[in-house]
Image (spheres, rainbow, N blue to C red):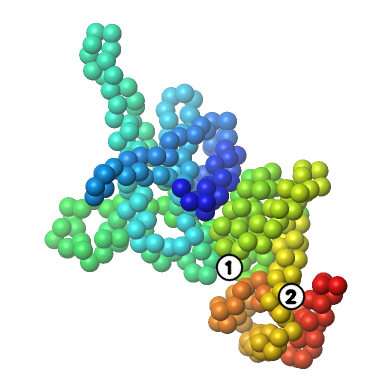
Amino acid sequence: MGERDILEKSLCAFNDVFADIVNTLVFNGTCRISEDSLENATVHSAYHGNKAFRELERDVAKNWLDNDIRISLIGIENQSKAENDIPLRIIGYDGASYRDQIRYEKDSKGLRKKSVDACPVVTLVLYFGYTEKWNKAKTLHEALGDKLLAELKPFVSDYKINIFEIAWLTPDQVKEFKSDFRYVADYFVQMRMTGTYIGSNDEMKHVREVLQLMSQLTGDDRFTSAIGEFDRNGEEGGIKTMRSAIDIYWEKGIEQGIEQGIEQGEDRHLVEQICKKLRRGKDVEQIADELEEDIVRVKLICEMAKEYYPDYDFDKVYKAVKEELLSVNV
């Protein structure tokens, strides 16, 4: 299992977070599942590949113990990029879960009887992309595409996957989350809506796991820098909120900007390009994408340029950025 996979799964694997995600997304905010009613389920199943048996692995899987009467298996898949093969993966996972429910044992008379009652299997796919909505296959038929002949379509059972586009939740829906997943969802919603992020001052319960997940989903190791600060200070004086984590995140971004040489001519040109695009009403995300620049660096310059709205005088903005970075380096 890769490091990225392990880190993505760690936050959602907590029972309080897992239950919160399902209650909010599936049960519309109603507390149907308590964290005490969940137990870890196997995430592994096997299938036969070209030359040997291979293993399928879900991101997170839990058994929901409902009054000791039935068990429902709910799996969560973390997905940061849209892929056409997701329906094929999900049908493989769910099929293996159903197959595992076909078990028999012998009673006292030696007669064969079923030992496990069949129960529903629900898989949720959490999509974290925020620049565009999920634009790949959502059903087995869509994944098969042109390979599925019209004559055969009535005989090929379709299979729908449950995609939840986290960045496209409303701010009110984000507030429905009671666990630390709220801070993750809030980040992607803010980035989708404004291209910027303002962290919450509410205290987190699973600080390290939230920051690890943010680092992996965004591909930005400045969140990892905040983890280091959290570890050094410990529980008493360490990071407890996203606001404090973001403060360290930005400090690290400024340091990296200095190391990259903000005084160089290429940086003057970058500031000038950003000012031109701000005059045209472009947001941070659009500017970073069009210039193919690190969004953290672009956001830093845009924040400094706000003071000079709406003209965004290039010389004044560049001077302000330069003075800010040099003052940090002193």
Nearer to me, 242 or 200 = 242
Q: Which comes before the other along the chain, label 1 or label 2?
A: 1
Badge 2 marks a residue whose secondary structure is helix
Answer few, some or many: residues within 10 Å of disc 2's Cα (few below 14, many 20 plus, some between 14 and 19).
Answer: some
Residue sticking out furthest to the left: 151
What is the three-letter code of the residue carrying label 1?
Answer: Arg
In the rendered image, residue 273, in percent from the top left (x then y), is placed at 64, 88
Q: Which residue is rendered at x = 45% and y = 34% of the image?
A: 41
Task: Report the residue marked by disc 1.
Answer: 192
In the rendered image, which quarter is residue 313 located in?
bottom right
How many numbered discs, if any?
2
Tell me the tag on residue 89: none
Badge 1 marks a residue whose secondary structure is helix
On the picture, is 162 further left or further right than 104?
A: right
Task: Report the residue marked by disc 2.
Answer: 258
Nearer to me, 51 or 61 = 51
In the rendered image, residue 311, in percent from the top left (x then y), is placed at 74, 90
What is the three-letter code of the residue carrying label 2?
Answer: Ile
In the rendered image, which quarter is residue 269 located in?
bottom right
Alpha-carbon span between mark 1 and mark 2: 28 Å
Residue 76 in view here: yes
Q: Choose mark 1 or mark 2, whichever is in front.
A: 2
On the picture, is 299 further left or further right than 219?
A: right
Q: Which residue is rendered at x = 68% and y = 85% of the image?
A: 267
